Image (cartoon, rainbow, N blue to C red):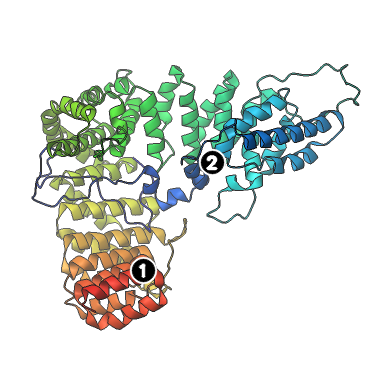
């Protein structure tokens, strides 16, 4: 679903699968038996699962901070009232100087910026914006707000700094929010000068009619979209709505998230089709931030059934539903936990509509959603059977969905898998990675020969997207358990990875920066090493050992993880040497793995190095002490 896969310096998330040995998706209660092919769904919030590439996108830091709860301010507290009263006096003075005494827009902006450095934008906006509007209902400060906005955020900020927490950044965001108040400008009669000189006309003064276009441009910038979209929805005019619709079709990343939320806040039914059709486009890695609010606000049932006769909307609705199911995959074991988002709507009706649409017009999108639904049902039913899940609302919903599960399993075992295999062989770049994950979950053996052929045909790495596809193929082959894949994957490394050059480079402690030309190679190299470890094929040991000396910490991490399985007892002396050398690795995560392997190998010769680690790297002392304890030292 996402066009952004795991970052090259992260451990890719395993598939969300608990498949039986035959690849069945039936509902069974397991008290013991085979180890699942992948871990349970992640327990962390959406934010914690974002890839490093998504976190480094423009506006990411600010958007994540804005979604965290902040203490609510009480406008009736004396200290808050005092600050607002002082602000009113100063802003009124500046407005008077601008309107009647010939002050310039630039000078007024210079003086108002420090006044707006009042505190967190998220805390103060609901109090401050109405208060400022009471002072400037006539819109005389519009040119000042535009002047502040045009100045932009401070330059050369550290990468981990939030521009919304700087004085200039706060003023700019409050200024954008102020624009949402102005629909009609009240113009004072010309003959009412109250003893002051005539108001100086600013040639740059912008009419209110132009504000929606200005806000539309700001809505496309992820550094200002959070506030521009709120202003457009607050204006609520035809021009503002038109600006939001234009932005919906052009926005990307965090800006797209903001535009969708603003459109939904208007609660206009005629926007639903557009939101369904375009909502998930150009938001790679941020699908949950869009799918969840759409699911909560729009009934997907008619779209899943394809009653509108629009296959594109049906496909997009299925992807939205699949994303919501994924976010609800972990049963809430605490009775006080909030209801998983999938259960906020009529899940049985939605699942029925989805399955009807899939049988009538099967696509990889609705098959993906059916697969996610089956996984969710299996996990929740298992939790209910064990007496862990006690929420009656969820129990009743799961019971109502059970009646269709046998039919879903039969269909997925036949027509569903056939469609997935045809899609995979069709080489649709957008479909291949999600389809691969489903076939891997289902342990579909008919995919193996095609996957091996695809690896054999790869002679060079063109870009990151190709690398992600090859990585997904390696993961799928590993989970399918066919050891024929080992030789093919090792040959792939020889063709597309310059291992000697990479090993000669200084070892990096940090993730490779976005755009680094070595990232595609790291993705494929790490995937091959990881897959060889899962297959436990010792013919790959030499390649894994060499990867432990790679310059990229992601690859080195994968290599040590693979060593745990490929040389679990440390029979190779070279493995011992590699692990001891890894105690000096600049990446803490690699050193932590090395400590674990030293314990696993019972390597007493590494004791001096562990003691040195305690003395020289205090952050890793606990890991070294634990290794010494397990060695009896």
Q: Position of residue 513 (x, y in %)?
A: 47, 59
In the structure shown, which secondary structural element does the residue marked by tag 2 occupy? loop
Q: Secondary structure at mark 1?
A: loop
Q: Which quarter of the rendered picture does the C terminus lie within?
A: bottom left
Q: Image point 18% across, 52% down: which residue?
A: 479
At 36% from the left and 61% from the top, the residue drawn is 522
Q: Nearer the viewer, residue 31 or 159?
A: 31
Neighbour class for label 1 at 10 Å: few (<14), some, many (≥20)? few
Disc with the residue nearer the chain's start (1 vs 2)? 2
The Cα–Cα distance between marks 1 and 2, rounded to whole angstroms, is 37 Å
Q: Nearer the viewer, mark 1 or mark 2?
A: 2
Image position, residue 350 (x, y; %): 26, 24
Image position of 330 (left or right of 502): left
- Residue 484, image x, y percentages: 15, 59
Instruction: Work out which quarter of the rendered image holds the N terminus and state it.
Output: top left
Whether residue 139 is visible? yes
Residue to which mark 2 is pinned: 222
Q: What is the quadrant of residue 631 in the picture? A: bottom left
Q: Which mark is residue 498?
A: 1
């Amino acid at each position: 679903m996402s066009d952004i896969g795991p970052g090259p310096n992260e451990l890719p998330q395993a598939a969300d699968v608990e498949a039986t040995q035959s690849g069945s998706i039936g509902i069974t209660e397991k008290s013991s038996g085979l180890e699942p092919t992948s871990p349970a769904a992640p327990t962390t919030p959406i934010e914690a699962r974002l890839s490093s590439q998504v976190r480094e996108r423009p506006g990411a830091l600010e958007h994540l901070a804005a979604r965290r709860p902040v203490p609510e301010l009480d406008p009736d507290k004396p200290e808050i009232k005092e600050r607002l009263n002082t602000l009113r006096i100063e802003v009124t003075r500046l407005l008077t100087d601008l309107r009647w005494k010939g002050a310039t827009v630039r000078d007024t902006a210079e003086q108002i910026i420090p006044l707006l450095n009042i505190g967190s934008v998220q805390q103060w906006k609901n109090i401050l914006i109405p208060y400022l509007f009471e002072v400037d209902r006539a819109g005389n400060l519009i040119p000042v707000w535009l002047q502040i906005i045009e100045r932009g955020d401070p330059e050369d900020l550290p990468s981990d700094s939030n521009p919304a927490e700087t004085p200039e950044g706060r003023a700019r965001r409050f200024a954008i929010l102020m624009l949402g108040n102005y629909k009609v400008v009240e113009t004072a009669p010309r003959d009412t000068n109250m003893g002051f000189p005539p108001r100086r006309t600013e040639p740059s003064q912008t009419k209110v009619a132009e504000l929606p276009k200005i806000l539309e441009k700001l809505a496309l910038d992820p550094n200002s979209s959070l506030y521009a979209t709120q202003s457009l929805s607050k204006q609520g005019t035809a021009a503002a709505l038109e600006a939001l619709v234009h932005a919906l079709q052009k926005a990307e990343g965090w800006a797209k998230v903001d535009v969708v939320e603003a459109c939904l806040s208007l609660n206009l039914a005629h926007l639903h089709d557009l939101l369904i059709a375009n909502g998930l486009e150009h938001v790679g890695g941020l699908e949950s931030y869009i799918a969840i609010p759409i699911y909560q606000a729009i009934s997907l049932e008619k779209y899943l059934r394809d009653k509108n006769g629009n296959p594109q909307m049906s496909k997009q609705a299925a992807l939205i539903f699949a994303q919501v199911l994924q976010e609800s995959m972990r049963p809430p074991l605490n009775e006080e936990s909030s209801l998983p988002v999938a259960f906020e709507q009529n899940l049985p009706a939605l699942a029925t509509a989805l399955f009807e649409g899939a049988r009538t017009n099967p696509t990889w999108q609705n098959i993906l959603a059916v697969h996610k639904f089956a996984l969710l049902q299996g996990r929740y039913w298992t939790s209910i059977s064990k007496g862990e899940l006690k929420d009656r609302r969820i129990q009743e919903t799961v019971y109502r969905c059970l009646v269709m599960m046998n039919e879903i399993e039969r269909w997925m075992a036949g027509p569903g898998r056939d469609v997935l295999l045809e899609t995979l062989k069709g080489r649709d770049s957008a479909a291949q990675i999600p389809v691969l994950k489903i076939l891997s979950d289902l342990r579909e053996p008919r995919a193996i020969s095609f996957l091996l052929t695809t690896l054999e045909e790869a002679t060079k790495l063109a870009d990151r997207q190709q690398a992600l596809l090859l990585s997904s193929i390696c993961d799928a082959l590993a989970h399918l358990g066919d050891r024929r894949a080992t030789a093919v994957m090792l040959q792939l490394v020889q063709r597309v990875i310059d291992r000697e050059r990479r090993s000669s480079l200084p070892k990096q402690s940090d993730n490779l920066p976005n755009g680094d030309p070595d990232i595609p190679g790291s993705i494929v190299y790490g995937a091959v090493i990881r897959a060889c470890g899962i297959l436990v094929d010792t013919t790959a040991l030499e390649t894994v050992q060499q990867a432990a000396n790679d310059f990229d910490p992601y690859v080195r991490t994968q290599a040590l993880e693979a060593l745990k399985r490929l040389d679990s007892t440390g029979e190779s002396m070279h493995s011992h040497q590699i692990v001891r050398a890894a105690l000096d690795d600049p990446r803490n995560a690699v050193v932590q793995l090395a400590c674990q392997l030293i314990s696993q190998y019972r390597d007493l010769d590494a004791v001096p190095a562990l003691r040195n680690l305690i003395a020289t790297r205090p952050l890793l002392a606990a890991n070294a002490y634990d290794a010494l304890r397990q060695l009896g030292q």
